[in-house]
Amino acid sequence: MKHLTFLAIALFMLACNSSKKATIQEAPTILPKPAFLEVLPGSFSLPKQVTIQVSSSAAASIAEFLSEYFRDCKILSETSTDDATIFLELSANDSSEAYELEIRDQGITIRSSGISGLFYGVQSLIQVTSNNPKTLPFLRIKDEPRFAYRGMHLDVGRHMFPVKFIKRYIDLMARFKYNTFHWHLTEDQGWRIEINQYPLLQEKAAFRDATVIGHASSRDRGNETFDGERYGGYYTQEEIKEVVAYAANRQITVVPEIELPGHSLAALTAYPHLGCSGGPYKTAQTWGVFPDIYCAGKESTFEFLENVFDEVLPLFPGKYVHIGGDEAPKDRWEKCPHCQKRIQEEGLEDEHELQSYFVQRMEKYLNTKGKTMIGWDEILEGGLAENAIVMSWRGEEGGIEAAKQNHKVIMTPVGWCYFDYYQAGPEGEPLAFPNQMTTVEKVYSYEPIPKELSKEQAKYVLGAQCNVWSEYILDGKRAEYMVYPRAIALSEVLWSPQVDHRGYPEFVKRLNNLQPYLDQLNLNYAGHLFESSAN
Ligand code: ACM
Ligand code: ZN
């Protein structure tokens, strides 16, 4: 009798653990939307103590990452015969980002042939559990990204953000399955990466004596007002290593950008001999484009940049390095005897070809170090460097042109991908880049493959990226406001299949469902956009 009672209790508990009532629950919200998601009848109750088992020690880091999301969680050894709640099955150890996630009565299984895939399965599971922390619907997900490059950029030159925020930025990227952080580290207004061989970069180039107030650009020169406050700072190499490791743990590669030949006024302020005139220069206090750039005629410029890269490259294990290349006025080069001598000696047509000489020479150097160079689309002018990847920002044209020349392309066209632009208003919105607007809907409508490309040429489009320039973004809270929810819209453009059932009104509905998750993250998203876009 006693045994029967025990049996009855055990059966009752089992029944509670996995209800097989033939009700199909609503599909949980996962953004970006998985390629395939099927909700099945029944649900699984998460036990008080969650146990995770990995199929091999290679997946242990993913188990540890996931364990942080449960209050009471134990990681079982590979050989344990205890019942596990979550199984992480790594079938190989390749670079796959595809995964399968199953929730059934026997538990939760995430399968992939790659660590990244397991990680994305875990991110989907975290969103499912945050929707409904105790009872999870039975389901099956088979998912993989549409594009290999899913990037977010952050400019730390105009305004700088503490390491703690950079890590948070990366953590949020990972939740929406981005895989590349483009860290824009040098600017006219500040040099932000420690270079031991050049201490004046830390002492001088990392600081400016004042910052312009309100909207200002090259067109407003002479009419600005300034705050009179010294502003600046830089990331030490130890901090950079810490960020890169943090990102790697979230399957994110960090691409450093060291701008050349333009946007280099801060570096010239520290080392004036690198400019055509020899200076003196002053770290920029206002925004826009500045005529003083690295001299392309002096050998000392290339020596400096190679030495800088010798310290930068070991910090960033990824294969890509961004060299900028945008917005480099040729005024100084036209008048500089060194630059003109270079044009003559190298048999160059003009200053545009001189820029190509500059960029191609740097590319060769980076290639000898095993790196692939990325540059803004101006690197097309005067002839493209041999292996360069083009980041198309002034529109889609640069990307189309590069793909037609069989060069890889990352799309970041201003009209869709610049998150320093207003997303609403401008009345009632915080100060942003003037006279430009990119709504969430516009971001969601973006198609990274330009229709001008053939199927073969389209293969050169690696993906896309949002750019977050920080002239008007003074701190992390503001950065989050500008980036979210637009980055969620772009994540779906980059990850989810391009199919009919993925439309904007349906996206907005799912975005609304995601609000509790965003609130849980304490995210400073532009919440008022949700209501207006739902109408
Ligand atoms: C850029 O926005 N100047 C790349
Ligand atoms: Zn020069």
Image (cartoon, grey):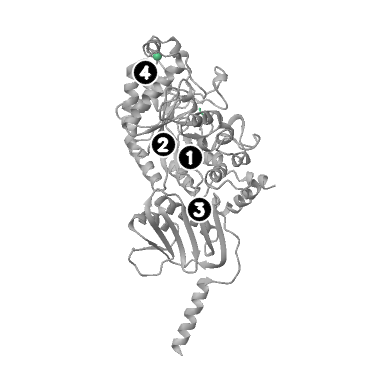
Q: Is mark 2 within 8 Å of ligand 1?
A: no
**Residue position marked by numbered label 3 in the rendering:** 143
**Residue position marked by numbered label 2 in the rendering:** 255
Amino acid type for the residue under numbered disc 1: Gly
Question: Number of labelled discs?
Answer: 4
**Residue position marked by numbered label 1 in the rendering:** 151
- Tell me if 468 is positioned left or right of 68 in this view: right
Separation (CA) of disc 1 from disc 3: 19 Å
Closer to the camera, 341 or 257?
341
Separation (CA) of disc 2 from disc 3: 26 Å
* x then y, percent, for residue 327: 49, 23
> Taking the image as drawn, is residue 195 in sight?
no
Amino acid type for the residue under numbered disc 3: Asp
Amino acid type for the residue under numbered disc 4: Leu
How many residues crowd around disc 2 within 10 Å: few (fewer than 14), some, or many (20 or more)? many
Q: For marks 1 and 3, give the one nearer the viewer.
A: 3
Residue at the extreme right: 535
